[in-house]
Amino acid sequence: MRTSIATVSLSGSLTEKLTAASRAGFDGVEIFENDLLASPLTPEEIRARCADLGLTIDLYQPVRDIEALPEEEFTAALRRARHKFELMRRLGADTVLVCSSVSPHALADDALAAEQLSRLAGLAEDHGVRVAYEALAWGRHISTYDHAWRVVESADHPALGTCLDSFHILSRGSDPKGIEDIPGEKIFFLQLADAPLLAMDVLQWSRHYRCFPGQGGFDVAGLVRHVLRAGYEGPLSLEVFNDVFRQSEAGPTAVDARRSLLTLQETVGLATPPAPAAPTGIAFAELVTPDAAPVSAVLGALGFSRTARHRGKPVDLWQRGDARVLVNTGPAERRDGTRLAAVGLESPDPAGAARRAEALLAPVLPRRRAPGDAALEAVAAPDGTELFFCATGRPGLPDWRADFEDVAHPSRDGEPWRVDHLSLTQPWHQFDEAALFHRAVLGLRPQESVDVADPYGLLRSRAVSTDDGAVRIVLTVGPAPTDDTAHAQHIALATDDVVAAARRYREAGGPLLPIPANYYDDLAARFEFADGELETYRELGILYDRDAHGTFRHCYTHTVGRVFFELVQRDGGYRGYGAANAPVRLAAQHAVRRFTGG
């Protein structure tokens, strides 16, 4: 099915927006009137530019406040519309969006609205234009799609149809099933947007918080199914008003937008990209650092052993149980200390996972391979983290460990450590994109977003995981775009005995994050503990949480560069990440930074 995007959804000049839409693979665009008015190009030049880029102009929008008006105001509105229709002829656009009126002069008179829309459609028809009438969720008298359709049906003009907008329909809680009663040929256009579920004025919600399908809480796919059953054959078009998108680069935003439509088409059965190959575990986490000594000291204190070294690169493999960390001291683009640069994901089908990623606009990264290096596929996540699709120890498939030479025996005890989860801080403008990427490309299931109080603002956090919890990734975004302290990443290591692990780490010289005594006083009020249990947690800086399924105990190392480690113990099927404790942890980390200067 053809795809389109409204220019208002992207940042930059009109030419930048058109270029970004074309490069992302869109078939067409909606030209937002403000973008045209601000452009130095003539309508003819814009038309030619779109043709050169392989884009059709699917809609010109919007014409406002034109129906159910007193005759004098309607005459003026017709004069304005005639000018727009002449402009559209020069632009090469044949469909115009007309929004339901919000004018204080508009009358609550459906018969008058239908009569005037019919006259407007007659004028449009003379100019080779169709009118797509849309109910704004905050329209003065017409605010629902079914009401708008009744008016269009009553007007009964071949050049008049309706435009359906998922935000306006779903934000009001309207039942989209009634869309199937609208003849498909009278649905002139379909605009799509998702949004987080917020309790706020619908106009402000619409103007600032829309997002691409799959990034919010609306059932956009369900609505599209109803539209398709009605017989609609036009494009799937995105109209997204979002403050973050308006400040982000147009190119990546356009790719994110197109990925959302590709995923939506898969969901509703319009497209069949390669099937998801959800990862089955974490093969390794790779740290890049200009100086291996600090992070090596932390890993050694945690009980990891340096077991192997890459045959041709300055990369060491540290391992404890099934938890593996690569330490890479090769040239780094960013000299900001240790950072988590790559993740190895165990995949049931590495080649298939790479094909799906590429189909969903996450191109496979080029890699410099020496002769004999394992042929691993990797893609880049929105934050730049490299994701490798691995098949560790599986015969017949490339094994990344074959690139390493053993330098020591495996880790010194048999305790079944593994990576419980990874926390990746996202650029502030890519949080929603990251959630969609991990769901659509990797096949991970997103959980609800959580706001966490940081001493200097609010952190947003959203976990994505496999159903069995074998892979868990927590995506976070800092309290402000310029807050460098918000860019910490961490690796959470699962152990069966966090108290013993914390003691061993401390005895080996590793400093644990100190937690204020006030936290433990509050913990005593909230939960009952066995004799001496709370005192042990207080001594070691262990935090505690409980949900309906089980309990969670966890503690933290100090930060090295941008990375710290977390020791976690899940009991009884606990499903969370200790979010209730995050404000205390964040405050403690800020305090350590102020004290140490690091």
Image (spheres, grey):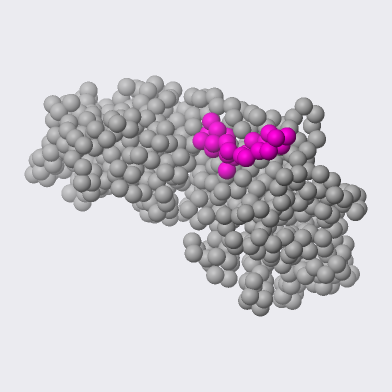
Judge whether 331 appears above or below 122 on screen: below
Judge whether 132 appears above or below 68 on screen: above
Residue 413 rendering spot, x and y as whole percentages: 91, 53
Q: Horizontally, is 83 left or right of 284 in the view?
A: left
Q: Is residue 161 visible?
A: yes
Q: For the point 55% across and 33% down, which residue is it?
A: 358
Quadrant of res 109 = top left
Q: Residue furthest bottom?
A: 595
Residue 369 magenta-highlighted:
yes
Judge whether 142 appears above or below 319 on screen: above
By secondary structure, the bulk of the magenta-drawn segment is best described as loop
Quarter placement of the N terminus: top left
Q: Nearer the viewer, residue 13 or 144?
A: 13
Q: Nearer the viewer, residue 241 or 350?
A: 350
Q: Horizontally, is 230 left or right of 360 in the view?
A: left
How many numbered marks, from 0 up? 0
Residue 236 magenta-highlighted:
no
Quarter placement of the C terminus: bottom right
Report the magenta residues as a range.
357-380
Residue 206 rendering spot, x and y as whole percentages: 38, 49
Residue 14 rendering spot, x and y as whole percentages: 29, 44
Residue 60 rendering spot, x and y as whole percentages: 25, 37
Q: Is residue 423 visible?
A: no
Q: For the point 17% across and 33% down, which residue is it?
A: 90
Judge whether 309 appears above or below 59 on screen: below
Q: For the point 85% across and 61% down, which residue is it?
A: 501
Q: Horizontally, is 325 left or right of 449 in the view?
A: right
Q: Nearer the viewer, residue 311 or 432?
A: 311
Q: For the point 23% across and 33% down, which residue is it?
A: 47
Q: Horizontally, is 266 left or right of 515 in the view?
A: left
